[in-house]
Image (spheres, helix red, strand yellow):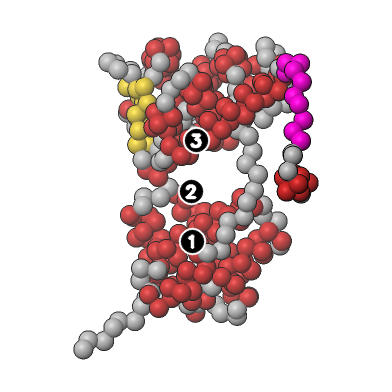
Amino acid sequence: MADIPAPPSFATLLQRYFAENLIQHRAASPRTVAAYRDTFRLLLLFAEKHISKPPTAIALTDLNAALVLAFLDHLEQDRANGPRSRNARLASIRSFLHYAAHYDISALPVIQRTLAVPMKRCDKPLLGFLSRDEMQAILDAPDTRNWTGRRDQALFTVIYNTGGRVSEIIGLRVSDVVLEGSPCIHIHGKGRKQRSVPLWRSTAALLRVWKRELGDVANAAPMFPNRDGAAMTRSNVAQRLALCVKVAAERSPQLLGRSVSPHTIRHTTAMHLLQSGIDISVIALWLGHESPTTTHMYIEADLSMKERALERLQPPQTGIPRYRPQDQLLQFLQSL
């Protein structure tokens, strides 16, 4: 009878998880890989102090529920992390344990108990989005008498048209923009997923003018460069948007004091599509959501908006008789 090979060590499993599973098979984005990496850096440093083992000596069974719970408490109490950050770290650990369970059956009881550690409930903030008038005021704000203003107007129009993430839009190349036939933009999305988003006629017309202004550049050149010809950064886009919001507030005073980020424009696109009667599954494809369940938050936000409008309406002056239970048992239940 052949000997059963020993399961791989924790160190080997963790390296395989990142190199093979996360990067190669799941094609996770660099930001996702960095977030998971930071989780395990923190966890291994915590475990070294908590159970007196260096990272290379830690076994998979050391990642028990008690250690993980202590680590999560450490994040909240010592590092002042909120519930969302805590839950994100726990999700990273869970993902690794699901992977590791396939390679070390002997650790399954410990893994199952650790996977049972619950996420912490937290309040979900209401999505911030702009009205159509507010969005139009921002798109009209750039000073199109100069190169930077013309670029900004094209940039924010594309973000609004596509609902793209800021990282997706600043990563656009000239070759990604198709302006002949059926105009569209090929977006290289989160998790290396690609999608094509159609362009409104007005957006396509604006981009034709902008493309001519870029001149004879290579197909791989950024569609929205900075003055040096390099791709814009996230912070650069945020700064330019803040300037536009400041100018737009003169036309739409309700923008004063509001926090408007590039992601707010993404939420605005989704809400305007929803309010126009577009099916939620189409919006999910438009935004590049992996599942329509992610897009469901826009329905919830729209309902909250309607409820606030309802609260502003005066209710009809009709008297509602007070319910009085007749039975003693019902009276008892009513009193609880």
The amino acid sitting under disc 2 is Arg
**Mark 1 against mark 3, which lies toward the viewer?**
3
| SS class, disc 1 | helix
Where on the picture, by quarter, is residue 260?
Answer: top right
Among numbered discs 1 and 2, the one appearing first in the sequence: 2
Pick the quarter of the image with the N terminus: bottom left
Identify the residue under disc 3: 296
Q: Marks 1 and 2, how far apart in space?
A: 18 Å
Q: Residue at x 51, y 20 (%)?
A: 275
Q: CA distance from mark 1 to mark 3?
A: 24 Å
Looking at the picture, tell me which residue is in the foreground, 280 or 167.
Answer: 280
In the rendered image of this protein, does residue 111 appear above or below residue 250? below
Q: Which residue is at the front of the view, 200 or 245?
A: 200
At 37% from the left and 65% from the top, the residue drawn is 16
Residue 5, percent across and down? 30, 81
Quadrant of residue 234 in the image?
top right
Secondary structure of residue under mark 2: helix
Residue 48 in the figure: left or right of residue 217: right
The residue range painted magenta reads 314-324
The amino acid on which the numbered mark 3 sits, given as a three-letter code, is His
- For disc 2, the marked residue is 31
On residue 94, which mark appears? 1
Q: Earlier in the sequence, mark 3 or mark 2?
A: 2
